[in-house]
Amino acid sequence: MALSLGLSTVQRLAANVLDMSLSRSLCALTISTRKDISTSSAAAIAVSHPLCAEPLKKKKRIDPAVVRAREERRRRKLEKAIRRLEKSSRQLKPLAEMELPREVRAELSERRRPARPLTTEEANERFDLMKEWTRHRREQHVADVAVLRRIQESRAKALRELRAESFQLYCAAIEEDPDLVPWAHSGPTLTPPIDGYDAPDGDYVDTTRRWE
Amino acid sequence: MRLTWCSRRLLLGGFQFSCRTLSQAARAEPAPPAGQAGPWHLYTAVCLQRLPVVAPPLSDTERRFAALLRQLEFERSLKSSHEIRHEMDIATAEALRASEGDDPDLAEAASLQTAADFEDACAEELAGFEPAPTITEADRAGDQRSLQRRLSSRLVLVVQQRLGAGTSWMLPQGRHQDGATLRQTAEQTLQAMVGPNVNAQFLGNAPWGFYKYKYPKPLQQESGAVGGKVFFYKAVLRGGSVEPVADRVADHRWLTAAELGGQLRSRYRRAVHRLLIDHD
């Protein structure tokens, strides 16, 4: 470029020496590549920021086997760490509510009840009662299923008849009812509520455990 | 429609009660052939229920099994702090008696409230509370118009409805008019029969039962319809008061499923009974 602009020999020499790819000094001398035409070619030479470091070293070639070995070692280390963490997550954590309190565990021997062995009659009675109970529960279940099936059939019949009578009313009938869900009901209690009952005041102690 | 929680609650041994399956099945089936020739008047009837207030008493098997479970739990348990304290109190009293009142520490320990004293105080406090009786005045009097009767059963409202010249015992029933859905008709019917202050929650938009009846001949000619088709809707009484409207309803009763037989006609009673839960 300097040649094309017809500059002097000295200036041409300077351009060859100051190669943009190599710099062996603290600062790099650059030559602008923009094709301006200027009367003083000194405008094309600029100085960069001080680099304050060693010039970059030449990159050495590493043996690919060594590279692979290093990768392998890194992967095995990570997998081992993952396995260790997973083992910890698989272990069941202790629940404070399910364990005996510390004070009780300390005096466990005093708290045990004397073992009273069952007589044969008592054992047989218990066995018979449990059998009776399973039979009773099964009968209840069968009765419940029969009741629900009967109700379902009654409803299916009602919908069939409605469909035969008026398709428009039928479509309105099978619409969702958004007020039905969620359904809330306070179930039956052991004794009925007392009218105008004034509950006595009591202490309320909040024993919620907090971890902060 | 996602009624999955509802299906789960009513899931008994693989028996699904999902409205989605019902509606899909009903849509998929071809419409059954039309009944008698001639138009039918459509009616909606409301099965208003008061749910049980109190749990039914335990049966003999249930009582004995509950006692067995309590016994097993006691045998497998450790002693509580209250029991330990009681044993220590007994030991202290024994020691005091053995030392004949010489030891001041023992005397002091024995003068504090013992576990037995604490138990007695608690029992006294409990005895001071009087729970409401499960068998009420209305039960003893047999007052079938009262809602306080048979607290462990479901009660269904039955009215003596005025029809033309006479009256008939039935569930509150009203004629369906064009322009409203069946559920809206049911809600309006209930309010017309028992007043606007009743707080009833209707269970869905679909009817739960069906009943068909033919008009007598003169009425058929007069009205131009063969008879009436009644669609039953279920509702649960949430509160408010039932005030029967005099010009529509002569009388009303709250009956259990078993007592309905005495009040309603046989074919109608069968249709109503099919949609009720009756094991209590």
Image (tube, coloured by chain):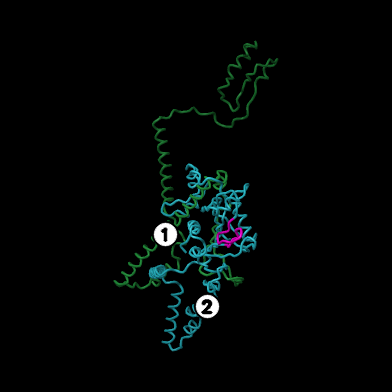
In percent of width and height, residue B229 lies at 54, 51
Q: Kindly identify the residue that appears in the image at 48 percent across and 78 percent down.
A: B115
Nearest the viewer among B187 and B11 is: B187
Tag shown at residue A143: 1
In the rendered image of the structure, the colour used to display chain A is green
In the picture, measured across the screen, residue B135 lies left or right of residue A44, that is left
Task: Spot the cyan chain and give its letter.
Answer: B
Q: Amino acid at mark 2?
A: Ala
Chain at numbered mark 2: B
Magenta span has B44?
A: no
Q: Which residues are magenta?
A: B159-173
Q: Quadrant of residue B249?
A: bottom right
Q: CA distance from mark 1 to mark 2?
A: 39 Å
Whether A27 is drawn above or below B191: the answer is: above
SS category of the residue bearing label 2: helix
Q: Position of residue A84 (x, y in %)?
A: 41, 47
Residue A146 place in picture, x, y as percent? 42, 56
Q: Secondary structure at mark 1?
A: helix
Return the residue found at the far right.
A39
> In the depicted view, which residue is nearer to us: B134 or A10?
B134
Q: Which mark is residue B127?
A: 2
Tag 1 near tag 2, CB within 8 Å: no
Kindly identify the residue that appears in the image at 52 percent across and 52 percent down. Answer: B212
Task: Using a 10 Å C-alpha cutoff, classify the residue at mark 2 as few (fewer than 14 neighbours), some (14 to 19) or many (20 or more).
Answer: few
Residue A212 seen in the figure:
no
* Number of numbered discs overlaid on the protein picture: 2
Chain bearing tag 1 is A
Residue A171's label in the rendered image is: none
